[in-house]
Amino acid sequence: MTPAINIAKKAGVPHQTHEYAHDPAHASYGLEAAEKMGVAPERVFKTLVVILETRELVVGVVPVSAMLNMKQIARAAGAKKAAMAPAADVQRSSGYVLGGVSPLGQKKRLRTFIDASAQAFATMFVSAGRRGLEIELAPGDLARLTSGTFAELAAADD
């Protein structure tokens, strides 16, 4: 059990967990999850923590097949600039290790923005709080549990 799974259970949200053998040599945690679960990468989302120019940390949830657009998450958060947060800040704030950061059950609740593409799916996959463990749930339930907002966050392919 992880804090992420506990949050979903406590809220009575329909969900499924999916476990797979994490390979430390794999270059991308998210793409590895999609491959090992046999799921389209567009349905598997990574949780990224960014820091705004105000020093506020916020969460961006985007497909593993995409990049987080810093201008778009800054705009969604009402800020001018955003950058990836330092790893130590992410781990301290979330309570999770990199590659296993879940948008659910973080130690410190941060404002959360979910890429609008998630709304196209009945269910989506996000980390359940450790490498090799995913939780599948409806995008609306993720938004409700995180008080998240849907926004265009993924960088356009050039």
Image: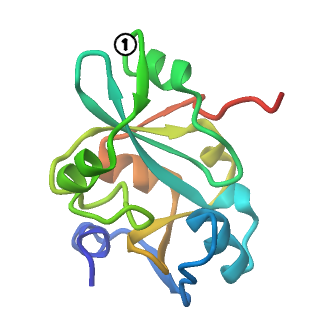
Which x, y percent locates residue 132?
49, 81
Give the answer, above or below, for where 52 lies relative to 142: above
Tally the marks: 1
The image quarter containing residue 104 is bottom left
Name the residue that disc number 1 marks: 79
Question: At x 57% / y 39%, what residue is drawn?
Answer: 115
Q: Residue furthest top?
A: 80
Give the answer, above or below, for where 99 lies relative to 49: below
Q: Residue furthest right?
A: 158
Give the answer, above or below, for where 118 lies relative to 83: below
Which x, y percent locates residue 117?
66, 42
Quadrant of the frame with the N terminus: bottom left
Give the answer, above or below, for where 138 lies relative to 58: below
Question: At x 37% / y 13%, what residue is drawn?
Answer: 78
Q: Colour scheme in the image?
A: rainbow
Q: Residue furthest front?
A: 25
Which x, y percent locates residue 146?
31, 48
Q: Residues within 10 Å of mark 1 (few under 14, many from 20)?
A: some
The image quarter containing residue 100 is bottom left
Q: Is any part of residue 120 visible from this angle?
A: yes
Which x, y percent locates residue 12?
30, 71
The image quarter containing residue 148 is top left
Question: At x 23% / y 27%, what residue is drawn?
Answer: 56
